Amino acid sequence: MIPVNRVVDEIPARLDPESAEWLRMLAVTGPQQDTALARLHEMLLRIAQRETRRRGPRMLIAGPELEDLAYQAAADALMAITAKLSQFRGESRFTTWAYRFVILEVSAKLGRHFWRRPDVRLEAEEWDRLPGRFGFEPARESEWRDLLAAVRRAVDTELTARQREVFVAIVVNDVPLDALAVRLDSNRNALYKMMFDARRKLRAALAANGYLDDDDSGHS
């Protein structure tokens, strides 16, 4: 049996009935708690399986290995949830609160798994692969090579060192966001914000040098 914190002495009246029932069943000991834990694990596993199957191909993971990651994520999320029941304040439904735990576990496990590949290096810069990945037309090579050169100059001169590291990893090297978050000890939201700021700087620099219309530089 997973140890559950005995901290739900008084269930807040503002909780919705379903959330209150989850807390009540998880706070007791015996068959009711076992049933609640089994239901919660089943729910977490479904979420983990859906997320790993959605994100797995991007990470080049499939088959039994991917399924194993889903089971690990569900198990670790269940442990985290039961250890932190006292932190549930009812700002959202209990199932929504629990959902966040398993999504974080999936992200972390997929991200760590990505770096086990021997061919992956964060410091690599694959600028020469961009034309093929972006589908640039060979017939217009002189145009897009000039644009890529301008982008690269802007990346080197306009971005902070951290913004440059994140931009190059995601855009140039095609590193998945979950993997980069693990490597940089960050999170998806922080990286999204950093990429937003970096793109805004790059658009402004390209517009100032005539590569984009001024109106385009205001959009991300």
Image: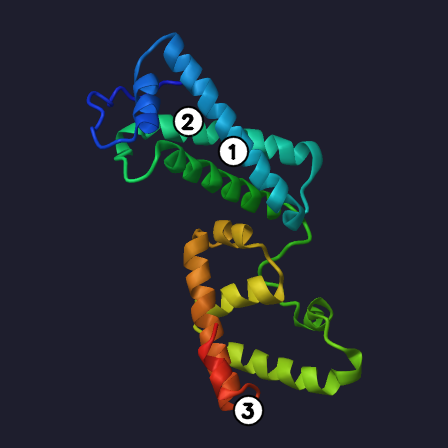
Q: Which residue is mark 3?
A: 210
Q: Tag 1: residue type?
A: Ala
Measured as percent of width and height from the top left, residue 121 is found at 62, 57
Instruction: Identify the mark nearer the N-term, 2 or 1.
Output: 1
Residue 142 vertical position relative to residue 34 in the rendered view, above or below: below
**Residue, x 56% and y 29% (percent of image)?**
71
Q: Amino acid at mark 2?
A: Met
Query: Which color scheme is applied?
Result: rainbow
Secondary structure at badge 3 equals loop
Label 2, on which residue? 79
Residue 1 visible in this rendered orientation of the protein: no
The residue labelled by disc 1 is 73
Q: Residue at x 32, y 39 (%)?
A: 92
Who comes first in sequence, dot 3 or dot 1? Answer: 1
Q: In terms of sequence position, does the residue under pointer 3 or pointer 2 come before the other? A: 2
Label 2, residues with CA under 10 Å away: few <14, some 14-19, many ≥20: some
In the image, residue 109 lies at what x, y percent? 54, 40
- Looking at the image, is mark 3 or mark 2 nearer the viewer? 3
68 is higher (above) or lower (below) than 24: below
Q: CA distance from mark 3 to mark 2?
A: 55 Å
**Label number found at residue 207:** none
Q: Is residue 12 above or below residue 164?
A: above
Q: Give the secondary structure at mark 1.
A: helix
Q: Is residue 131 left or right of residue 83?
A: right
Of the pair 162 and 30, the residue shown nearer to us: 30
Label 2 to label 1: alpha-carbon separation: 10 Å
Circles 3, 1 touching at the beta carbon (< 8 Å): no
